[in-house]
Image (cartoon, rainbow, N blue to C red):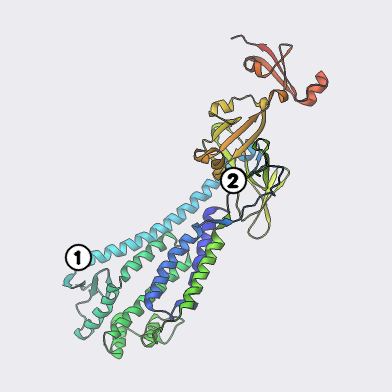
Amino acid sequence: MNPIVRYCLEMVACSGVFALLYRTLIADRHTFRTCRRYLLVTTMLALLIPLIELPILPPERSTITTEQVQRLEFKTITVDYDQVQPTTRQISQQNGRNALIACIYAALAAIIGLLTRQGVNDLRELKFRSKLTHHEGYDIATSEQIEAPYSFWGTIYLSPDTPDEERELIIAHERSHIAHRHSIEKLYLGAIRTVVWFNPFIWLADRWLAEVQEFEADRDVLDAGYDLTLYRSLIFRQIFGYAPDVQNGFYSLTRRRFEMMTAPRPTGGEWWRMALVVVATLAMVAACGLSRREVSGTIIHPTQNVANEALIPSSNVVSVGTAVGRSGIYYLPRNPRRTYRLEGNEIYVSTFWGFERKITSRNYRHLERPLYYIDGRRVSGEEFRNRPTYLTESMNIYTDDQAVALFGEEARRGVWAVTLRPDSRCPALLLEGRWVSLRQNLDAVERAVRVVTLTADEARAKYGEGYPHGVIEAWDVVEK
């Protein structure tokens, strides 16, 4: 699964769990300050939890024996470049889809962000056009353009027609919003909502936060000694203007505010609810972030000589690639949550729903500018590409942490390592009709006009037994 899609799904799932915990364990059961902090903290946790990786599970490894030294590494399968490199049509289709999705996401995020910013700018301009009265800790802006009272940052916005008997109650309510810094909390959630606008639980958290802020301001007004009946009448006349939603509708903020005004205060002792929240958070971290440890280096049995080490790959196919010159390395990153199976030259991976799908070229990761080694000696990319391929005995691809463990931090961008054949396993060289040593005449082979490489079977059919590693025929050598 695409990492971005997986992150979005895990983030929405975490937000949903936090929302469920809020409605069942936190809302109306803890203080308003606790509810506000819960909504603010869990909103950020839902964004961070899918990013956490905890490599605490034991690594998958083969059994260590007393006869071998085991190096834990990925099984590497060399494939042709054409099988790995996506076609031009595939690249165009994928880029087109990605560009369309990115444009839709960016457009909606930009619209939400611009609307939020425009609202803040409108309030700032309204404040400058209004008549300002400075008080200790807050300002009062009075203007004919203000229809209903509200507050933002450190300013209370009032209509000049507000009666004196209601003005004191309104200021007490809005002053509570300013004292608790409710505007900062709204801007905080607004910024998150702009980035992850597709998450419905973020919008729910924003609405629940607005509710709690109103509940808290109402409670502060009543705690200051103002009359409950007078305050309720003020809400009808000044803030809402009418009261039909109190009796009708599936949801009514007005009715909820009235209920919370007389609701008993939380008495504490509900620590076990928060303990359940902590447990659920740890469970989500484990579900999203657990991965297997990476084992670097070589595991050596005390009685075994390092010179006789044996290479034992893991059972899962976790990296596939080929050397393609300057194009780098293409390989298949291993997902610890999935199982890989090799069938012939095809690779299949388990899916989230328990099925299997075939690995395609778009699943490969591209590493540019890898390091090159020949017989343990680091060489340039040009020397690596120009090496005589008929001298190659084995090739291996190393990526990520495995490459770092074997070749150092600089090898994080990938390593292509080649082991050459010893003289005893080199092909025989027939140079201008004479049998000579291949290693001692590599330069002559490079200057030959005609070079024919025969496999072991072809050499046996043409020259008889005695050529188990094949034959190279070189003719018409150009003099230096």
Q: Is 440 located above or below residue 292 in the figure?
A: above
- Frontmost of labels 2 and 1 is 2
Which amino acid, by three-letter code, is at mark 2?
Arg
Residue positioned most to the top? 479
The C terminus appears in which quarter of the rendering? top right
The N terminus appears in which quarter of the rendering? bottom right
Q: Is 73 located above or below residue 373 in the figure?
A: below
User: What numbered label is drawn on residue 362?
Assistant: 2
- Report the side of 336 relative to 150 (left or right): right
Mark 2 to mark 1 CA distance (whole Å): 56 Å
Of 117 and 390, which appears nearest the observer? 390
Of 293 and 381, which appears nearest the observer? 293
In the structure shown, which secondary structural element does the residue marked by tag 1 occupy? Answer: helix
Q: Residues within 10 Å of mark 1 (few under 14, many from 20)?
A: few
- Report the side of 426 relative to 159 (left or right): right
Of 21 and 148, which appears nearest the observer? 21
Quarter of the view holding residue 71? top right
x and y, in percent, of residue 186 in the image = 35, 68
Indicate which disc, 2 or 1, sits on the residue closer to the N terminus: 1
Residue at the image point whose x is 41% and y is 72% from the top: 207
Quarter of the view holding residue 172? bottom left
x and y, in percent, of residue 474 in the image = 69, 15
Is residue 209 something that shows in the picture?
yes
Which amino acid, by three-letter code, is at mark 1?
Phe
User: What numbered label is drawn on residue 34?
Assistant: none
Of 146 and 4, which appears nearest the observer? 4
Residue positioned most to the front? 303
Q: Is 91 located above or below residue 215 in the figure?
A: above
Residue assigned mark 1: 128
Q: Residues within 10 Å of mark 2 (few under 14, many from 20)?
A: some
Is residue 198 something that shows in the picture?
no
x and y, in percent, of residue 229 in the image = 30, 90
